[in-house]
Amino acid sequence: MVNTLTSASSPVADELIANAAYIGTPGKGILAADESTGTIGKRLSSINVENVEENRRALRELLFCTPGALQYISGVILFEETLYQKTASGKPFVEVLKEGGALPGIKVDLGTIELAGTNGETTTQGHDDLGKRCMKYYDAGARFAKWRAVLKIGPNEPSQLSIDANANGLARYAIICQENGLVPIVEPEILSDGSHDIAKCADITERVLAACYKALNDQHVLLEGTLLKPNMVTPGADSAKVTPEVIAEHTVRALQRTVPPAVPAVVFLSGGQSEEEATCNLNAMNKLNGKKPWSLTFSFGRALQQSTLKAWAGKTENIEKARAAFLARCKANSEATLGTYKGDAAGGAGVSESLHVKDYKY
Amino acid sequence: MSAYVGQYHDELIANAAYIGTPGKGILAADESTGTIGKRLASINVENVEENRRALRELLFCTPGALQYLSGVILFEETLYQKTADGKPFVDVLKEGGVLPGIKVDSGTVELAGTNGETTTQGHDDLGKRCKKYYEAGARFAKWRAVLKIGPNEPSQLSIDANASGLARYAIICQENGLVPIVEPEILVDGPHDIKKCADVSERVLAACYKALNDHHVLLEGSLLKPNMVTPGSESAKVTPEVVAEYTVRTLQRTVPAAVPAIVFLSGGQSEEEATLNLNAMNKLEGKKPWSLSFSFGRALQQSTLKAWQGKTENVEKARAALLTRCKANSEATLGVYEGDAAGGEGVSESLHVKDYKY
């Protein structure tokens, strides 16, 4: 037990700690651009673009090469295909990111599968040969990884089995990443689907996060070299909305009760929130007084790309307009991490559009 | 429901926060009748109620001492005792701005199939007892779980039994208006190094906070009383700065920010060691979202006892010794202790007793 990452400093531990801390730099956050081929296909079809490799490559080039955007981005999560892609002029994306001061990250899970005997609850797969894959990704330039566990709220959900299986799955993934130099983002997403109130979401979130940190401790994960990607604490999608201040209060309290101070940063997922909602909620959290020994930032997919996609519509002549939309959201979220967002990016097309898809799979 | 929200919710939070006031800490004066007997015997004083009462009056009525204390843990007998003039001790404490606390566990019992490991008893009718103590003026409680480090210790059974025992005690306290001090003491006995102590402390604390979450304990209305992270008693000593670094890192890895204060036990450390270690922790840079203070028994009373010797003519001298240690520890909670109380008699004497039971 005394030869773990947690008991003695080592170059591996030091690098994990430095990279995790960097990702949590105030003013920066993560662009989640790791949509699997199937999922990105749905996005592309919504703007009538064919789901072929060149279009997937072009979309990512549009995002990563937006002038001035990368200063607001500490990391970009990539799907495996994208890790090996290049710009039209032949420059590897990982180099574009590194030169822009953004760490490349990699989605390493292989999606969810149902847990027998439950009411549609799932666990996440992808552990087999995960170490070998991580080593390969590290060689290709990745420095952090992401694994999405999914839970839901219902009359009997999440079940103890779902909580335990997902927490243990996340912890096993996390230690394997660290053994191979990748900072693991731990993502226990509790879907917002349902008619429950915010207090219910808070209860469940606290139970799930407590189980995650117990599992991480059991598996000897170095918390200083990890990140947490949780849902914000909100009312269910079918329930009445509340203000950003109420979301901030419930969310921060849930984190205070469960996330050890050793964790350097909490990078929220946006779930089905609109771009503007997600930004305002993050902003409210950073304005809140109280104990917050981890930085609070973003790891947004849909909430950073929605208006960009709409503006692009797959047409080269729209790239500049699309990039302007993307830059606006990056800047807005950067300000939100500092609690200084004034709502001036609210005017863009689609920014207030809910991105909620029931029982979201990607 | 994730955390207790009953009638005492706000009061628990306020009292727990008060106990963690910077510059203040806890005097652990809850020695059971048997244990205080050993202390009295060491200064040739008979273990009768009047002497036990007189000792506590000596402590609680030391002029100027209570300003450095936010709480005093009492044994049941003491909760109902008075000064020689007939003033209840709980009133003395309250008037001095000190919350009375009460030890509510009934000691340890061995876990079958282990190598001398124990769990702590005292859950039966605990709610009724807490209610009674609240009515008598107590506002916080304490329950000591004990673990040890060995080749195969602590076992998973010992960790799980003690963590769930602590959590069950904690929620019962909160239901009855008492802030629970959660004390998972890992004994210092052994030849292990500081890294081993850190590993074990992290495992034990993680188990405790999982159990507290399982039992819906309101963390904002609780306190933690852990051991500092140190080398084993048979191992080479390290500096206060090293103790501070390992201890604070262990806490950062396991104790949620919602916990308002951490009140260290002194274990077998001498008075001066305990103060210096606490001071070093409060000087350390880094994330510390809970205040770091003291809940000392032996490390606040040792030189006082020696000075008293059970003799009325020594009361003033004994009180001076207590005041010195209270002030020193108060400064340590602020990271400003200069070591000027080191000159007292007995302050550097190790208070380690192997396999300590009290």
Image: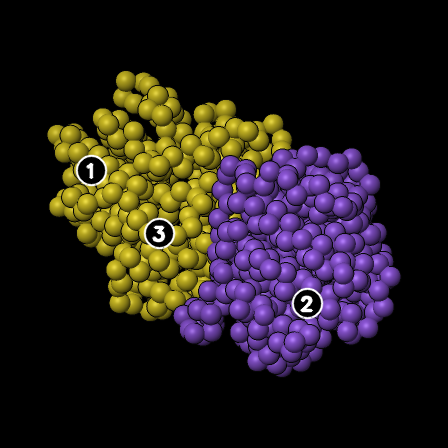
Chain colours: A purple, B yellow
- Whether residue B105 appears in this view of the structure is no
Label annotation for residue A51:
none
| Residue B32: image location, x then y, percent | 38, 41
Mark 1: which secondary structure? Answer: helix
| Residue B272: image location, x then y, percent | 22, 49
Tell me if mark 3 has few (under 14), some (14-19) or many (20+) residues whose alpha carbon lies within 10 angstroms of its own: few
Work out whether B150 lies above or below A256. below
Quarter occupied by residue B232: bottom left
For disc 2, the chain is A
Q: Nearer the viewer, residue A329 or B43?
A: A329
> What residue type is disc 2 on?
Glu
Determine whether, in the image, residue A147 is placed left or right of residue A225: right
Find the distance from the CA under tag 2 to the CA under tag 3: 42 Å
Tell me, yes or no, whether dots 2 and 3 are on the same chain.
no
Tell me if mark 1 has few (under 14), some (14-19) or many (20+) residues whose alpha carbon lies within 10 angstroms of its own: some
Residue with the mark numbered 2: A61
Residue with the mark numbered 1: B324
Label annotation for residue B285:
3
For disc 1, the chain is B
Residue at image point 83% right, 69% down:
A51
Mark 3: which secondary structure? Answer: loop
Frontmost of labels 2 and 3 is 2
Find the distance from the CA under tag 3 to the CA under tag 1: 27 Å
Work out whether B75 lies above or below A297. above
> What residue type is disc 3 on?
Glu
